[in-house]
Image (cartoon, rainbow, N blue to C red):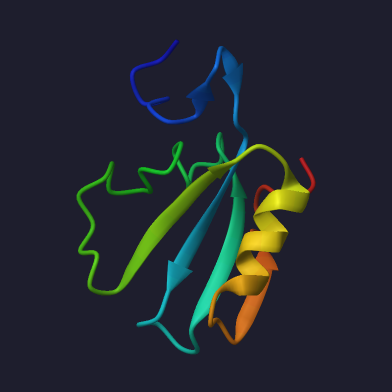
Amino acid sequence: MATNQRAAWIGGRVVPYWIYENWQAGPHKAVIHEAGCSFCNDGLGRSNGTADTRYGRWRGPYASRTLAWDAARRMPAEDRRECSRCADR
């Protein structure tokens, strides 16, 4: 297991989805990512976990795309979507 797969492993299985919630850039949004997406990096993001959490945060992991969507719908985001880079790999 790679060291960046911190919470992406639960109970010996991969948990593949994360949500990036951002309230700073444009409308409040929730974007669903696969754990292996270069933007997600298993919930660490492009800054490897050092991003300023005043602007956004990673939520998850979620065991399925359906569970990630359920969680995104409960967030106060105006824009909910899947990452255009990793959604249909």
42 or 70, which lies in front? 70
Viewport quadrant of the N terminus: top left
**33 shown above or below 53:** above
Residue 67 at x, y percent in the picture: 70, 50
Residue 28 point in image, percent of width and height:
48, 84
From the top left corner, tell me how far across and down residue 9 is, in percent: 50, 22
Q: Is residue 26 visible?
A: yes
Q: Quadrant of residue 71?
A: bottom right
Q: Nearer the viewer, residue 39 or 68?
A: 68
Q: Is residue 84 visible?
A: no
- Which residue is at 35% across, 43% downward? 44
Identify whether 61 is placed above or below 3.
Answer: below
Q: Is residue 60 above or below residue 79?
A: above
Quadrant of res 2: top left
- Please identify the quadrant where the C terminus is shown: top right
At a point 28% along the width and 41% down the height, the residue shown is 48
Q: Is residue 3 left or right of residue 33?
A: left
Residue at position x 40%, y 82% from top? 25
> Could you say which is closer to the camera, residue 88 or residue 32?
32
Please tell me which residue lies in front, 7 or 87. Answer: 7
Total labels drawn: 0
Residue at left 42%, top 31%? 7
In the image, taking residue 1 as reference, residue 24 lies left or right, namely left
